[in-house]
Amino acid sequence: MPHFRSQETVDSALRMSNNGVSDRANAEIHGVAVKTIKRWRRQYQELGLPRGQGFQPTPCPRCDGAELDEAAYALLLGWYLGDGHIVAARRGVYTLQVANDEKYPELNQEIAATMRLVKPTASPCLRGHKTAGYIRIEVRWKHWPCLFPQHGVGRKHLRKIELADWQREIVAKCPEQLLRGLFHSDGCRFVNWATKVTADGETKRYEYIRYQFWNESEDIRNILTDALDLLGIPWRKPRINAVAVSRKEGVEALDRFVGPKG
Ligand SMILES: [Zn+2]
């Protein structure tokens, strides 16, 4: 066994450590002793050895001025507001989780790819839930709360959800992406059938499409309707916790960037 590990191994272990992987698991993955992992962390992180020789954390668009892919961010914001959570992991690291039905593998790949665009070094983890039929897509990062300041204690509909000014600016540039994330997480595109009697007495069946969005949070419903308003898409509230788009021109507009899930 060599006494020195390649820089690649050290970097990989430190990256995992920074993403909240425990020292024990990290040691197993890299085939080194737990105390070696501890030493690397001490040397590179706590002693502040010059960056570039070792681990480099992913810079944050908010704290470090890193570039942010705004379209990807608006899409991820939609998913986050719909079916996403941020949970605290170890050592100040947070896990962003987005849950989605396992029936839609393409959408799930899209969520993972979107997370990678927002955090370029991410390798999203897709976890299946054995009985519930959904997938959870996860990425760890210290800076998720910077990107989603809506992060807070308790369920989203029980607390105030307000976009920060910089988020509003991004949404104003990319309302389609936000709407795609929101409708795919908490909404549905229905195909309904109806019959109509024509002038010559014939009964004809025709289909019409409707989009509907459900969320218990009034704040989140308002974020959705604000984005619809930005695009001039007509909507209505069929019930207190729902927003529907059923006028033909509105459905056609949503079909251009939301569409069916599968
Ligand atoms: Zn940050």
Image (spheres, grey):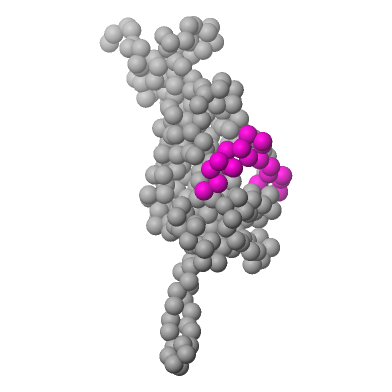
- x, y percent for residue 10: 39, 15
Based on the displayed image, in which of its 4 quarters is residue 244 positioned? bottom right
- x, y percent for residue 19: 49, 26
Q: Is residue 175 visible?
A: yes
Label count reads 0
- x, y percent for residue 225: 63, 54
- x, y percent for residue 7: 35, 12
Q: Nearer the viewer, residue 180 or 82?
A: 180
Q: Nearer the viewer, residue 61 or 139?
A: 61
Q: Can residue 224 be seen in this view?
A: no
* Residue plotted at (53% across, 7% down): 47
* Residue plotted at (50% across, 26% down): 67
Image quadrant containing the N terminus: top left
Q: Nearer the viewer, residue 247 or 209?
A: 247
Q: Main secondary structure of the magenta part?
A: helix
Q: What stretch is highlighted in magenta?
A: 156-176
Image quadrant containing the C terminus: bottom left
Instruction: Check if residue 109 falls in the magenta segment.
Output: no
Q: Which residue lies furthest to the left in this view?
A: 1
Above or below residue 153? Residue 238 is below
Q: Nearer the viewer, residue 219 or 105?
A: 219
* Residue plotted at (41% across, 32% down): 123
* Residue plotted at (32% across, 12% down): 6
Instruction: Check if residue 168 falls in the magenta segment.
Output: yes
